[in-house]
Image (tube, coloured by chain):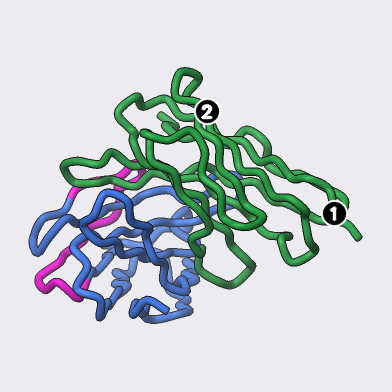
Chain colours: A blue, B green
Amino acid sequence: DAGITQSPRHKVTETGTPVTLRCHQTENHRYMYWYRQDPGHGLRLIHYSYGVKDTDKGEVSDGYSVSRSKTEDFLLTLESATSSQTSVYFCAIRGTAVATEAFFGQGTRLTVV
Amino acid sequence: DQQVKQNSPSLSVQEGRISILNCDYTNSMFDYFLWYKKYPAEGPTFLISISSIKDKNEDGRFTVFLNKSAKHLSLHIVPSQPGDSAVYFCAASEGRGAQKLVFGQGTRLTINP
């Protein structure tokens, strides 16, 4: 199994509070991604990173920020959580070759009450 | 702007028959396509992929077909087994630059005994 760990695995937080989710990899892969999965929407890309300090927005980036200060860690921050951000969040990693798959973490279930 | 679309939210197939899952894309710059399988409470796992230089790729019971002119790909599972019941996602990426990886909404496949 690819070395990718998400923390925490479950979190309940109140509306308006900041939340940070962590993705840690031991594979030294260049690309890292944050997705959210919601019924009827599948996996939607929030932000992704193509190197240390190099990040870009995905299709649903509003309300989220990311940081990657080390190759192995990719942080997703909800500055002020809202109920619409209740979701399951997945981190993925991918190598640099064109023909390579992405490996996913186990997911973080976030509930904003 | 949904660049990757799976228009069938669900599919039910009898055990032993063929399952065909479809995926359409709009971005002509996509040149690498992947299928993922997801069980409840787990992260997606890679199933099979295809590069745009091919029109077919086979791996055991799984075959992916790519029709570039129609911007359409399909996943065939033959014969279908109960363990194939899961949500299937197709994904696409451009093999250059930041390698954004975009997923479809998913299709829930149920294999009936």
Q: Residue furthest top?
A: B69
Chain bearing mark 1:
B
Discs 1, 2 touching: Cβ within 8 Å: no
Query: Is A87 placed left or right of B31 in the picture?
Result: right
Instruction: Check chain identity for marks 1 and 2: say if they share one.
Output: yes
Q: State whether residue B5 appears in this view.
A: no
Determine which quarter of the picture holds residue B96: top left
Q: Secondary structure at mark 1?
A: loop
Badge number at residue B72: 2
- Is residue A57 a member of the stretch shown in magenta? yes
- Is residue A99 a member of the stretch shown in magenta? no
Query: Residue at 9% across / 64% down in the picture?
Result: A52
Q: Which residue is mark 1?
A: B16
Chain bearing mark 2:
B
Measured along the vertical axis of the image, is residue B22 above or below residue A26? Answer: above
**Type of amino acid at the residue the image marks with label 1:** Gly
Q: Nearer the viewer, residue B38 or B33?
A: B33
User: What distance separates the C-alpha of mark 1 from that of mark 2?
Assistant: 25 Å
Q: Position of residue A62 (x, y in %)?
A: 30, 46
Measured along the vertical axis of the image, is residue A28 above or below residue B78? Answer: below
Q: Which residues are magenta?
A: A56-73
Quarter containing the N terminus of chain A: bottom left
Q: Nearer the viewer, residue B86 or B60?
A: B60
